[in-house]
Amino acid sequence: MVKFELKRDRILLRWGLEKLEWCIEPRYWRNPIIGVALLLILPLFFYSFPHLLTMLTTANLLACLAIPLSLQILGTARVNFGPQLYLGIGGYTAALLNLHFGWSPFFTLIATVIVCGSVALLLSPTTWIAKGLYFSLLTLILPLTFLDLTYQFGDLFRGEVGLFGMSPLLDLGRVRWNYMAYYYLSLFMMLLFILIADKIGRSRFGVTLAAINENEDVARMMGIDVSKYKVFYYVFPSILTGIVGWFIVHTFRSFAGITYLPLDYMLKVLIIVIIGGRAFVYGAVPGAYFVAIIEEVLRGFGHINQWVFPLVLIAMILILPRGEGLWGLYHKRHPRDYFPKLHVRRE
Amino acid sequence: MIEIKNIGIKFGGLQALDNVSFSVGKGEVVGLIGPNGAGKTTMMNIICGLYKPTEGTIDFEGTRITGLTSNKICHLGISRTYQIPQPFYAMTALGGVTVSVLNGKKRPNMCLSDAGLEASYYLEFVGLFAKRDELASNLNLYELRMLELARALATTPKLLLLDEVMAGLNPVESNRALDMIWSAQDQFGITLLWIEHVMKIIMNAAQRIVVLQYGKKIAEGPPAEIVKDPRIIEAYLGGKRK
């Protein structure tokens, strides 16, 4: 039986021994609401520029990849170079099931979650065995192996050309309306991912996450079941990444391993995590928008793009506050402020 | 309370501990001393589950704990401090203690703010309340040791393993630390197994002393007997030339 309580600044939900708190004080919600409202209004001005809308949708999807990645890097205490493996697995699962068996997007979503979850669960013992650089190398090589597989079994995966003609998530009849709808869908997915990561980060599990990230052995000595946490923080973000693959399949209606699996796509996501701010997940949003816009602006310069893009990013990493990234520009807090505080009133 | 029987561990060809057995009773303070490299910290790591012993068994209140993981051993009620303090450097003092409050035993209904409140109690106990929002990397050695003590106490241990708490502290600080440990023992009713190199302190503090040398137990008894034992004088100062 769920009990519902309304306190001065928060809503409390209790069931059994569990409880869920939700802060409703407006000063905590003002800035997020302004930010979300901006993101909601912004595309209306771009109604007649579909390529800009696609750019913003891409930015949202990149943020959707960066949020689980930062959660995964924190929770397993290892740098993961291969988030796009699950993007590939999720995308190909959805695409192949839709093309060959005619499954609707809803069923391919379930299949994607199951397939990504079980592959991640199979690979999760690597977070116990491989340490430091070895884990990074392992995750680096897995997407490339998968890319090779898409070439090897070209009849099925069509690695070079890509799969196309999957059924769309929704069809509003007009192309521009569709672009708009896909922007909003990707935005809602991004906000959902942020909400999930935020809930984890602010709860008791967030402190535990920080402890695992600091020192595994000491965390284990403090009674944390590190192995269990690591499996969860490996599998859960992997599933989220797989869902992004499913979304790409059913909105862009084409999916090719060569686009999403190689190293440069992964580098883009890692760069978002770094310049967006490693300290907290919200940084993924400004980071993703920054990278997507820079990419779009530099596209006109042709070949120079390959030189300017990395230079701009290196400059950003050097200029921005250390470890705080773009988010740190807005949020000038000391790192200690991320942890719970006790205020003592002095008379 | 804890029964250590015939513990032996090999690192490659090195027999770090060989057939060591002793026990610690409830409410006792037992000192574990020995020259450098005698295997004291190895013993502690084995009790905590960091190393698996190659032979022998450890029973804690009737439960066989050899082979259990550290977190399960912690839940049973064994906690430790480190010789070189290992706090969570990027976390505040309060955050670090909150981690142990939340995870030291099963607390399904504890939210973060409740845990912070309880953590503040342990911080106040060791005298670090004023530094609760300080990052651990900004604390000095004495404060780090006290933070470790607070973190260990916050897991509600029955047996606390202290690994050279006094090393590197000046006399005033070590007196304060000693007072702290006594009041911790009084208030929380814990048993202590204490590694120490400062003989003056451990000889006064412990009711029983276990002496290790080259991985073997060479003596066990009350401090008054231990200081007179010729084998121990030989282990520490060297024997007479024959």
Image (cartoon, rainbow, N blue to C red):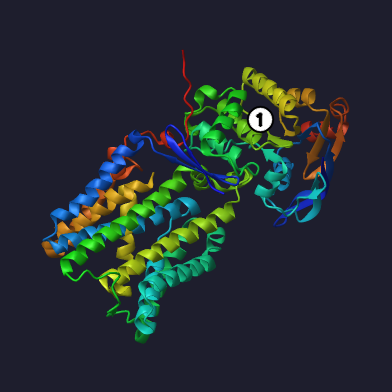
Residue furthest out toward the top: A347
Residue B38: where, in percent of width, then height?
74, 41
The relative height of residue A84 versus residue A13 in the rendered view (above or below) is below
Q: Nearer the viewer, residue A62 or B172?
A: A62
Residue B76 horizontal/vertical position (percent): 72, 44
Tag 1 residue:
B165
Measured along the vertical axis of the image, is residue B93 above or below residue A116? Answer: above
Which of A195 and A20 lies nearest the eye of the viewer? A20
The amino acid marked with disc number 1 is Val
For image coordinates 26% across by 50% down, the residue present is A314
Q: Residue at x 36, y 69 (%)?
A: A246
Q: Residue furthest bottom?
A: A155
Relative to the observer, which residue lies in front, A198 or B160? A198
- How far from the left and from the top, in percent, is residue B7? 80, 50
The chain letter for the residue carrying disc 1 is B
Q: Note whether A93 is above or below A200 in the view shown.
A: below
> Would residue A262 be seen by someone viewing this image from the given angle?
no
Answer with left or right where residue A6 lies relative to residue B156: left
Helix, strand or loop at disc 1? loop
Q: Report whether residue B75 is seen.
A: yes
Q: How many marks?
A: 1
Residue B147: quarter of image: top right
Q: Residue at x 46, y 34 (%)?
A: A7
A318 left or right, relative to A77: left
Res A58 quadrant in image: bottom left
Q: Estimate the x, y position of residue B104 in percent, counting from the top left.
A: 64, 41
The residue lying at 49 percent from left, 69 percent from top is A119
Q: Is residue A254 left or right of residue B189?
A: left
Q: Residues within 10 Å of mark 1 (few under 14, many from 20)?
A: many
